[in-house]
Image (spheres, rainbow, N blue to C red):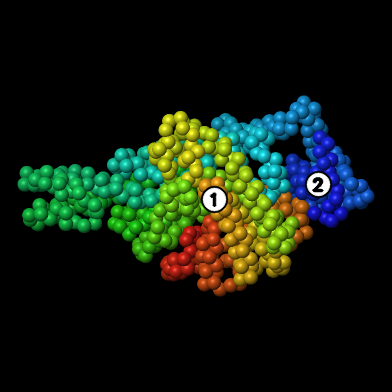
Amino acid sequence: MKEEFKDLVVVKRTGQRVAFNGTKIAIAIGKGFGSVYEDPNVKDVNKVYELVLKTIAENYKTRKTINVEDIQNIIEESLKKAGYINVYNSFSDYRLRRAKSRDVFGIRPQHKFVKAMEKVGYLANEANDQKPNELISNFAEVISKEFATAYLIEGKVEKGIEEGIIAINGLDNYTFGTPCSSNLNVDFEDLKTVQSFMTEIIHTIILVESDQYQEQTLMNFDRILSTRVLNDFKDIFLKEFWNNLSINGLDIYIDRNKVEELVKPLTNIEDKDFLNTELKNGVLKNIFEITYNQTIKKLNRLIKDNFERLFDIIDTILKKNIVICLDNDDSFISKMIIINYFKALKPKSKVITNIYINNDEEINKVLFEKTKSNKIHFVFGKNHDVNYFSNGICVFNNINGTETSRGRTINSISTINLARLALKNTCINDFLKELDNVMELAKNALMQRFEVQSGKIKENYNVLFNKGLLYDSEKLDDGQKVRKILRNGAFVIGFVGLVEAVFLLNKKADNKLNNEDFEMLTKVIKAMNKKCEALSNDLKLNFMIAEIYDQSIINSFIRIDKSVFGSEKTINKSCYEPVSKFINQSKLGFDTQLTLQAKYQSLTSAICTINLKNAEFKKFTKLLSDLEASKIKYVEVNYDN
């Protein structure tokens, strides 16, 4: 904030006196432009903002106070002076409507909630291409957001949101009390066949989608499916074997009970000697070989058909991401499942695949081809209790129980705009001090939402707290609140603009990441981790940090920042970019880049993105080998041809 305004006090309509805050002026101007233009130019906003500040500086330099109404009058005058007549008219009309609203609703939250009704009316007028159920859903989200802002979120948090310092992810769903995302435990042990299992999976994911507001992941999917594949193999084999024997008139020479006794205990299907004791001659051995091949063929068809059925539901009915994690454990059945999984996966499917990498050349060839048209993330490591959401967040540590990702939720995310903190505080010590304060603000936002979430009972949800989908949820009695289950989930303090903040702190001119910048970056992340560790120990809840890639939040942050700090070169860009991208674009060698990517992932939840130039299978396998050697955990590979 400019020095001449440090002692200026703003008198609100209620008579309350507060420190002058130029950011609020920039936001008000931005909303004025946003009411006229779908994608307003922030340079225009900043131009008017600077004009307003100049007018205030000239006219109030000898005065100690300024009224809110005077500030708004100056905004109107500046809009007219700069030639933005349409914005001026819209801003002026808005002030009149708000004045009438204040006359009717004396209580501030009631007055604010009127804005929700106006937004609903706007949606109704603009929703020419929406179906009635979609429109109703949008209405509910608008009302939920405005109700939460007016009645549920404390003033300091609301102010932080309005000024673009923090954001509450999924604010549209706040009042519904739904968690963010979940790693579903879908063992469903009572379902013994591929068909019945997949039917239950489809039923479950459709219902879970409305029980939370972001993605769901299905962990260890090939491992869980393997037991059903084995069961189906036994059933199909026995049916085909007796049919083939009967056709050849040989069924009377084989002891049916003995064969079933030998087939029943099978734990794998690649070993063909399980009936050796009953195959007395070449004819029987030939029938066995024919039967085995028929069974494998039918089994492949069964697996592929059911994956196609699952993917069709995901691509045509579901609106949110589904992440399917494949253990790829090098077994015969796992390989069969994975090959058919990718055969069934259509290009540009909404399904996101997490797959643990091993050295199977056939599967790696499939991955090489499918990465061209599908979103596939590669997981490195041996612990298959670890899973990642598509944004790189890994919920694993648990201060209240077993360390695992299975059945664990992201309860909610509050995101901090680190670039804004560096724009205000160019000294690292001042920056870290304010960061600590803003993390407290983010924590408060998470805890306020937790109170809304934990007040729900399991019957408020379709299936999320049933069927053992979540960690310890089988211990939840009917009518019991879900608080003790959500305590195993994660409370994420997200961040964006980390590298931009480091460049501002280091007073960088070229915006190219180097080792010195990475050291500063590491210092910031370690400070955030230390804060989360203290919060976790103090509150006995799982706090963690994560880099956030939500484009709507990033766009909102940078739009406000550019409106206020328009001349700052570091933020003169379309969006704040992830750390991984800066590392890739640095002048550092590739091996050094991988080392930095791995170190960064060891400090926080984040996705590593690698661009493979002139992609060919040999380069692809070499890259996988390099990634594994570097200790990177979770990677998205894109082809740059």
Residue 463 point in image, percent of width and height: 44, 36
**Nearest the camera: 425 or 402?**
402
- Residue drawn at x 52%, y 61% is 601
- Residue drawn at x 74%, y 32% is 108
Give the amino acid type for the residue marked by disc 2 in the picture: Ala
- Residue drawn at x 47%, y 41% is 485
Q: Quadrant of the N terminus?
A: bottom right
Q: Quadrant of residue 202?
A: top left
Give the amino acid type for the residue marked by disc 1 in the picture: Ser
Q: Quadrant of residue 570?
A: bottom right
Instruction: Tell me the tag on residue 19.
Output: 2
Considering only vertical position in the picture, is 443 above or below 281?
Answer: above
Considering only vertical position in the picture, is 492 above or below 207?
Answer: below
Residue 121 point in image, percent of width and height: 68, 31
**Nearest the camera: 236 or 107?**
107
Please, which residue is most extreme toward the top here? 104
Q: Does 581 sit left or right of 338 as displayed?
A: right
Q: Residues within 10 Å of mark 2 (few under 14, many from 20)?
A: few
Residue 392 point in image, percent of width and height: 51, 55
Considering only vertical position in the picture, is 516 above or below 122?
Answer: below
Under circle 2, the secondary element is: strand
Please, which residue is most extreme toward the front here? 538
